[in-house]
Structure formats: structure tokens, C-alpha cells
């Protein structure tokens, strides 16, 4: 048979940049309330129909139901009968459980070249993938393929590699523990640790910082701690949009007399005022003011601000030594003298100037913190996605250590996770680095030896594909081309591959920007019933606070062709090993109970998971909760001396943060509104300080191109409408993924490799 010549497909790496009809209002001064309920219902009714919506919603986040496919915020022990979900949880469900479908007829009609010209919004709204499809090297149209042939195609490509390290196994954080474990096991059985995951672009900086300072890469607080906290600090996070039910936890903290300090370049609506939609009374009263002190820090000046706060606390402690918890510091920590000395070396005025915050506001925060011992620090992407992302978090740990705010009720670390099971995926082995203990347990349980050398994370994987040293890419969920930085570079990297495989629920851009051969393997989502031999299966997930619990789908799958993620992974593995391997792939991928038993033999905390995960589930072990720092140098929690970040901005340069609108889940665009920020029907907007606009003679709604230039390489994202906004001078904000082409592949956080999505040095060009 003649070998097909690969086509150079003319696909777009970004959607159309046509404006969609911007309407502006004043930014909102409070979050949720009746509008949130209304908008949530509009989304679900439109995608799923009224009856199906209401029935399904009543199962979401309930004890015997399915876990919300949105974020990783935990569920309270007592679940509300009115519905235990938020507006964005309902939107996440609507997106997954839509009645629209994308099958063979759709693909016969629309080529990948055509689809790639659509906006991400339009691509996503096409519907749920229903059939396995193949894009052959000589074609621009996907064609149906049988599951067996799809598995054989993958096996054939993997067998043809010169080394297993030429394969990349990416995971996005929606996969179940079971699927992720089996997937990691397959990569290791193949012989590679190339297991990059969305966490590399997300909370990796938290994982690195927390592991080095406290001995565990996860947070330490439990949901109930919010009621007991005297202070909750919310740093670099927009909970009103991205973790809406966290506002209920903040509300509880306030109602018990706690204070909330927010640190953010923007005054995010959810942090100002909250009308709890689950409490009709509260809504009629106009809700509750949440933030007591808002510190409007300049982008990436959190280290300066946190040092200033600690310096001021140290000065108070010098007068009356009860401000810091010296007993805690003596018993549990190492490095106190060094950080006090470091703080002394800084000039307070200089720190204040850098931070951009008013002295009064800092003093207010210091006053509150000086009197409190039960402090929770919450954070998300505003801290992790900078070159000094790891240091940002270490500075939060310093503050908590000074105050003895760990290992007691109402206190601790709270990195608020993004994807609903991103934390679980890491727990069960989705990691590119090597854990000796994990490898040893795999060898004992499965009788094969996993590779001992480190694999590739997201950035390294892209570079390897770009340089042709990796040739097969498999994605267990996610939308790699749009989520990763340096869109053009990442697209070329994927296009260099011999084969790209996407195990997905919904159509996205990564199905168009592909390797020479591409496969779409459609899978069941959270809300779908997962049946085998007339028996319904469940899987387990882990939330942001380390609770492992079951999730059981409710809906009849929209296509009989869909397979569960473990089944797909098992099918690929079985085809690769031709049915002859020490691991019984097909058995494990069908029998989740057995799979979980095996997981219990490998993963600490998963012993007896079949039973323990029932009902409310259970907490995984956490050494910080027990104040057990034996793993760390001198068996102590570590203070860290950090440096101030340098950006060396030229007079015409700005720092740009790429943020989420209220109507998106990462690269999935639910709608075109960002209600809380007063932006409607448009995503190509640039939030800018009015003084900066004047300096550049820019008027409201002028069109600009955004440009970045690192190491002489020019990158651009074109056509954005300028909006005057309450944002510090010198700072800009625009949405992700539209701004991803600006972020160089090799600009990332030291140690964690998290791309610098929140501090990109840019200039503007008027169009
Ligand atoms: N509805 C919805 N929910 C989601 C997601 C979604 O897209 N939509 N995504 C999920 C995922 S994967 C994640 S990781 C989380 C993301 O949750 P967030 O981290 O809240 O998401 P971002 O929009 O990236 O917002 C970052 C916030 O940090 C602030 N910020 C930016 N730079 C700085 C800085 O230098 N310092 C400080 N102090 N603040 C800064 C921004 O103003 C913004 O408020 O949400 C999860 N939940
Ligand atoms: N500039 C910039 N870039 C960023 C960020 C930023 O703030 N700024 N944030 C980063 C962060 S925090 C993250 S986490 C990444 C996100 O990166 P990804 O996780 O790769 O991206 P998502 O958009 O969440 O992936 C959405 C796709 O996942 C698939 N999917 C949804 N549910 C399921 C499921 O249950 N199973 C399977 N198999 N597939 C499913 C659907 O096909 C959907 O199209 O992006 C990162 N990129
Ligand atoms: S807070 Fe997160 S997990 Fe909870 S319902 Fe909303 S989106 Fe879902
Ligand atoms: Mo994330």
C-alpha cells in the first residue's frame, strides 16, 4: 500500500479575532444573588432542556450523586436540599451534558481547517463527541474508526518509537483517580515518566514551595476551619468566579467574627459583597460585605507587600513579644533568625512603593494580623504563575510560621485547586518526577520496574515535540494547544508529532491542531452513568482539601459508543502489550473495585478506599495537620529568605496578567459575558488604568495590538478593545487563552516551570 504523504493542514491556532459587539456597564459590587441563579438556569435549560436539567442538578454534589465537573472546592458535610452547587458549577454541567452532539456527520461536513477558523466559543458549543474518529495524514476530514482499530493505531505508533521517552502522556485535572492511576501505570509500564499535567501550568509552584517548606505539596486546612479562623487572607485569587462556593465559607468566617484580607490588583466583585443564593433571607437583605481590607497590590509585588507586613509585625513583636508565636517557632521551625535579619535589611518605604498599596491599608492589615493567631492563607494563580511563583508561596508560609498558624483549628495553608480532580491525579501518580516509594510499591504490586529517570513536564514536553525528540502525544482530557503558553510554538510542536490522541468529552482546538495522524476518543463525563454488565460503576475523586470520595454519574450517555476513561486506557495498554503483560489491563479497566484494591497497595492513604470513600469520604493523611515535619531538614518546617522580583520595565512597557472571565472554564468558553467586571458580549478586551491610557493618548474602546519581546523574539496578540478599569498603573489584564501567544515557552517559574501567565512584559500598538 502506498504511504500517504502528510498534508500541511492550514489550521488556525486561534479563533477568529472579529469583535462580537461589546457592551459595558459599571463593574458589579457584589457576587451571586438572584442573577446568579437566573444565569445558571438559563445555561442549563438551553443546553439540556428543563426536565433533564433539574433532575441532573439535584444529583450534583449530593452524597450519592456525582461530583461537580467544575472546580475542586470541597462540599460541606451537610448538603443543602435547595441544591449544592453554584452558578459556574451549573454551567460546567450544562457544558458537559449538552444535548448537542458532534459525530461522523458533523465531521463529514466540517474539515479541521474550517473548524479551526471558528472561535473557541463556537467550537465548544458544537457539542459532545460521540464516536471515535481518525484524521489520516492525507486528509483534512476526520473519519469514523472502530475502537479496536483506534487502539491498534496507537499501539502501532508506540511500538515504532525508538525509545518510550518519545511518547508524552498529558493529563488534565478532570480525570478520575482510577483513570489517572491506570494511565500513569501504563506510561511507566511502557518505560517513561513523561506524565506532564495541567498542574504544571497551575499549582505546581504551590506544590514545590509547600513540599520544600512544610513537607507536603498540598494545603492543610479543612472546610470547617473557615468557621474557626480569625483571619482569612485571599491572595491572587478570584473566588466569586472560579470557586464560587468558597464565598459561603468566607461568609461563615465573617458571621463568626472573622476578618477577610484580600490582596489583588483588581477589586473582584466576589470579594467585596456576597449574596448567598442558598439563603433567601441573605439575598433580600442585600448580602454581606466580605473583605475588611483590600490591598490593591501591583502585579507580582506580593513578595514586597508580604515582606512589608512581616517587617511591621516584627517591629511590633520587638516591643511586645506576643505578636509572633515564639513557642511554635522554637519547637517547629528552622531559619527564623535569617528571615528576621533579611526583613531588617529592607527599607519599609521602598517596599511600600513597590507594592503600590497605601500605608493606611497595610497598617490596617497589620493591626488585624498582629492580634490573630488563627490565620488561613488562600491563594491561586495570582501567586503561582510568575517567575518567582515558588517564592510567592514561600512568603505566605513565612507569615503563617511566624504566627504559629499551622496544625490547629482555623489556621493553615489553602492553595485553592483548579480542576475538580487535579489534586487526586497527582496523589495517584500523575507526575513527571520520580518517587522512589511509589516506584517501589508499583514493583511490589505489579511485578514490573518503572523507569527511574525523570520525565518531561508541560514546558519540556512541548520543547521535545518541537525538536522532534517526542513523536506521540496522548491527552487524557484537556486542550493542550490553547492552554499551554506560546501558542504558535506549541502548535508547531504538536504538528511535528506522528500521532496525537485526544481522549475528550467535548470538541476543542486541540482536535484541529494535530499531529500527522490524529485520533479523537470520546469518553464519558462526570455526569454520565458508567455501566458494565448491567451494573453501575462509580469512581473516586479528591477535592482541594484532601477528601477522597465517590462520584456516581446520573445521565444516560448521549452515545452508545462512549467508553469510560479507564476502559480507554486499558484498551490502549492491552493493544500495546498484545494481551501479554504482568498487569491484567482489561480486567483492571473494567473492574474498578479491583483496581482500587491495587491502588490501595501502592498509594499511601488508599488502603481500603472501596469502603472509606463511601458517603462523605475521608481525609488523606496530612503531616502539616499533625505538625509532623520529620521529612524536612532538621525535622523542622522551613522559613525561606526570598528575593524581590525584578522586571526592569522600560517606560513604555507594562505587566500583563492573563485572567479568566466569569463565563469560561479555562479554554472552554461558556459565554461572552464577564458580568462582575461589567463586560458583556466580548472577550477581546484589555483592562487598563485611566492614567496610563491618557499617557498613551488612548481613548476608551480604541483598538490595540499587544506585543511581547523576550530575548529578541517578537510575539503578538492582535485586536483588543481598551477599557478604562480600576487596575494599578503599569498593569494590564486580558483574558486567557487569547493572550497565550504572548507568553514565551521558556519564561516560567524557577523550579516549578509554571509559565508566567500573570506577568508578561508587553507593549501596546494602536491599530
Ligand atoms: N468558572 C471557572 N472556575 C474555574 C476555572 C475557570 O476557568 N472558570 N478554572 C479553574 C482552574 S484550572 C483554576 S487553576 C482556578 C483559577 O482560579 P484563579 O486563580 O482565581 O483564576 P484567574 O482568573 O487566573 O485569577 C487570578 C486572580 O489573581 C489576580 N492576580 C493576578 N496577578 C496577581 C498578582 O501578581 N498578585 C496578586 N495578589 N493577584 C494577582 C487576578 O486579578 C485574579 O483575581 O479556577 C478553577 N475554577
Ligand atoms: N495564559 C494563561 N494560560 C493558562 C492559564 C492562565 O491563567 N493563563 N491557566 C492554566 C491552568 S491553571 C490550567 S489548569 C490549564 C488548563 O489546561 P487544560 O486542562 O488542558 O484545559 P481545559 O480547558 O480545562 O480542557 C478542556 C477540555 O477537556 C476535555 N474534558 C472536559 N471534561 C473531561 C473529562 O471528564 N474527561 C476527559 N477525558 N476530557 C474532558 C474537553 O474536551 C474540553 O474541551 O491552562 C493553563 N493555561
Ligand atoms: S464551587 Fe466549584 S465545585 Fe462547587 S459547585 Fe461551584 S464550580 Fe462546582
Ligand atoms: Mo488550573
Image (tube, rainbow, N blue to C red):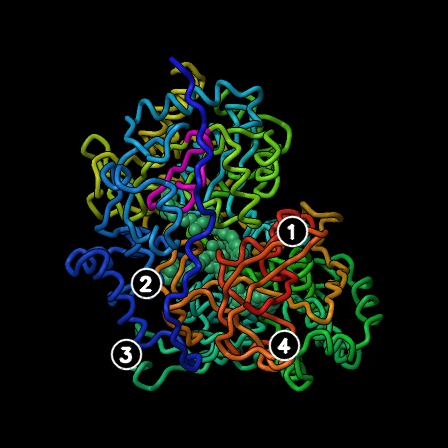
Residue 414 higher or lower than 460, as above or below: below
Are dots 2 and 1 in contact, CB under 8 Å?
no
Residue 736 higher or lower than 32, as above or below: above
Q: What residue is rendered at 38% in x and 64% in y?
A: 663
Q: Position of residue 401 (x, y in %)?
A: 68, 64
Secondary structure of residue under mark 2: loop
Q: Which residue is mark 4?
A: 696
State how many labels appear.
4
Mark 4 / mark 1, whichever is N-terminal: 4
Q: CA distance from mark 4 to mark 2?
A: 44 Å
Closer to the eye: label 4 or 3 = 4
User: In the rendering, which numbered label is found on residue 748?
Assistant: 1
Closer to the eye: label 4 or 2 = 4
Question: How would you rate the neighbour count of disc 3 (Cα within 10 Å): few for under 14, some for 14-19, many for 20 or more?
Answer: few
Closer to the eye: label 2 or 1 = 1
Instruction: Give the magenta range.
Output: 499-517
Q: Which residue is mark 2?
A: 85
Secondary structure of residue under mark 4: loop
Amino acid at each position: 500500500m502506498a504511504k500517504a504523504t502528510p498534508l500541511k493542514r492550514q489550521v488556525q491556532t486561534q479563533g477568529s479575532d472579529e469583535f462580537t459587539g461589546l457592551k459595558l456597564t459599571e463593574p458589579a459590587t457584589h457576587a451571586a444573588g438572584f442573577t446568579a441563579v437566573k444565569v445558571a438556569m438559563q445555561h442549563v435549560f438551553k443546553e439540556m432542556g428543563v426536565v433533564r436539567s433539574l433532575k441532573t442538578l439535584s444529583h450534583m454534589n449530593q452524597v450519592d450523586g456525582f461530583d461537580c465537573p467544575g472546580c475542586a472546592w470541597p462540599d460541606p458535610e451537610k448538603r443543602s436540599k435547595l441544591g449544592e452547587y453554584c452558578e459556574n458549577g451549573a454551567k460546567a454541567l450544562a457544558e458537559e451534558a449538552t444535548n448537542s452532539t458532534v459525530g461522523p456527520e458533523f465531521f463529514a461536513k466540517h474539515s479541521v481547517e474550517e473548524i479551526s477558523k471558528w472561535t473557541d466559543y463556537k467550537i465548544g458549543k458544537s457539542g459532545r463527541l460521540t464516536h471515535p474518529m481518525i484524521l489520516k495524514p492525507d486528509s483534512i476530514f476526520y473519519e469514523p474508526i472502530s475502537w479496536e482499530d483506534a487502539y491498534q493505531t496507537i499501539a502501532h505508533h508506540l511500538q515504532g518509537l525508538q525509545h518510550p521517552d518519545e511518547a508524552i502522556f498529558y493529563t488534565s485535572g478532570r480525570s478520575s483517580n482510577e483513570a489517572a492511576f491506570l494511565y500513569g501505570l501504563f506510561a511507566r509500564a511502557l518505560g517513561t515518566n513523561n506524565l506532564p499535567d495541567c498542574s504544571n501550568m497551575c499549582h505546581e509552584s504551590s506544590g514545590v514551595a509547600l513540599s520544600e517548606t512544610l513537607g507536603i505539596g498540598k494545603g492543610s486546612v479543612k472546610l470547617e476551619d473557615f468557621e474557626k479562623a480569625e483571619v482569612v487572607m485571599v491572595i491572587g485569587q478570584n473566588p466569586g468566579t472560579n470557586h464560587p462556593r468558597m464565598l459561603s465559607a468566607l461568609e461563615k468566617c465573617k458571621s463568626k467574627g472573622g476578618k477577610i484580607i484580600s490582596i489583588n490588583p483588581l477589586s473582584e466583585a466576589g470579594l467585596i459583597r456576597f449574596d448567598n443564593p442558598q439563603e433567601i433571607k441573605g439575598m433580600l437583605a442585600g448580602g454581606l460585605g466580605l473583605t475588611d481590607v483590600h490591598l490593591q497590590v501591583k502585579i507580582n509585588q506580593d513578595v514586597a507587600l508580604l515582606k512589608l507586613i512581616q517587617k511591621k509585625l516584627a517591629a511590633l513583636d520587638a516591643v511586645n513579644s506576643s505578636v509572633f508565636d515564639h513557642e511554635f517557632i522554637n519547637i517547629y521551625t528552622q531559619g527564623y533568625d535569617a528571615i528576621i535579619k533579611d526583613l531588617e535589611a529592607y527599607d519599609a518605604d521602598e517596599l511600600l512603593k513597590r507594592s503600590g498599596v497605601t500605608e493606611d491599608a497595610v497598617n490596617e492589615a497589620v493591626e488585624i494580623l498582629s492580634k490573630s493567631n488563627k490565620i488561613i492563607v488562600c491563594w491561586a494563580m495570582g501567586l503561582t504563575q510568575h517567575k518567582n511563583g515558588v517564592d510567592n508561596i514561600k512568603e505566605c508560609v513565612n507569615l503563617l510560621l511566624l504566627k504559629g498558624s499551622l496544625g490547629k483549628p482555623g489556621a493553615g495553608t489553602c492553595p485553592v485547586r483548579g480542576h475538580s480532580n487535579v489534586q487526586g491525579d497527582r496523589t495517584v501518580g500523575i507526575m513527571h518526577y520520580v518517587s522512589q516509594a511509589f516506584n517501589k510499591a508499583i514493583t511490589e504490586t505489579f511485578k514490573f520496574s518503572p523507569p527511574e529517570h525523570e520525565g518531561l513536564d508541560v514546558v519540556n514536553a512541548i520543547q521535545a515535540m518541537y525538536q522532534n525528540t517526542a513523536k506521540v502525544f496522548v491527552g487524557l482530557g484537556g486542550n493542550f494547544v490553547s492552554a499551554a503558553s506560546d501558542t504558535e510554538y506549541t502548535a508547531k510542536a504538536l504538528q511535528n508529532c506522528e500521532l496525537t490522541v485526544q481522549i475528550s468529552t467535548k470538541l476543542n482546538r486541540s482536535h484541529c491542531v494535530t499531529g500527522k495522524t490524529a485520533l479523537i476518543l470520546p469518553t464519558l463525563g462526570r455526569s454520565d452513568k458508567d455501566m458494565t454488565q448491567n451494573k453501575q460503576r462509580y469512581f473516586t475523586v479528591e477535592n482541594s482539601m484532601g477528601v477522597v470520595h465517590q462520584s456516581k454519574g446520573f445521565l444516560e450517555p448521549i452515545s452508545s459508543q462512549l467508553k469510560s476513561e479507564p476502559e480507554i486506557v486499558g484498551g490502549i495498554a492491552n493493544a500495546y502489550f498484545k494481551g501479554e503483560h504482568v498487569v491484567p489491563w482489561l480486567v483492571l479497566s473494567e473492574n474498578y473495585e479491583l483496581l482500587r484494591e491495587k491502588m490501595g497497595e501502592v498509594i499511601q492513604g488508599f488502603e481500603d478506599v472501596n469502603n472509606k470513600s463511601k458517603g462523605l469520604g475521608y481525609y488523606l493523611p496530612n503531616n502539616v495537620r499533625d505538625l509532623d515535619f520529620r521529612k524536612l531538614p532538621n525535622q523542622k518546617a522551613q522559613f525561606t529568605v526570598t528575593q524581590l522580583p525584578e522586571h526592569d520595565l522600560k517606560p513604555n512597557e507594562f505587566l500583563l496578567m492573563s485572567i479568566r472571565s466569569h463565563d469560561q472554564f479555562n479554554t472552554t468558553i461558556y459565554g461572552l459575558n464577564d458580568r462582575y467586571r461589567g463586560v458583556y458580549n466580548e472577550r477581546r478586551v484589555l483592562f487598563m488604568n485611566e492614567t496610563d491610557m491618557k499617557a498613551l493618548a488612548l481613548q476608551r474602546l480604541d483598538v490595540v495590538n499587544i506585543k511581547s519581546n523576550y530575548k529578541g523574539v517578537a510575539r503578538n496578540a492582535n485586536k483588543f478593545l481598551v477599557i478604562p478599569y480600576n487596575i494599578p498603573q503599569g498593569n494590564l489584564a486580558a483574558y486567557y487563552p487569547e493572550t497565550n501567544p504572548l507568553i514565551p515557552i521558556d519564561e516560567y517559574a524557577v523550579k516549578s516551570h509554571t509559565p508566567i501567565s500573570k506577568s508578561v512584559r508587553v507593549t501596546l500598538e494602536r491599530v
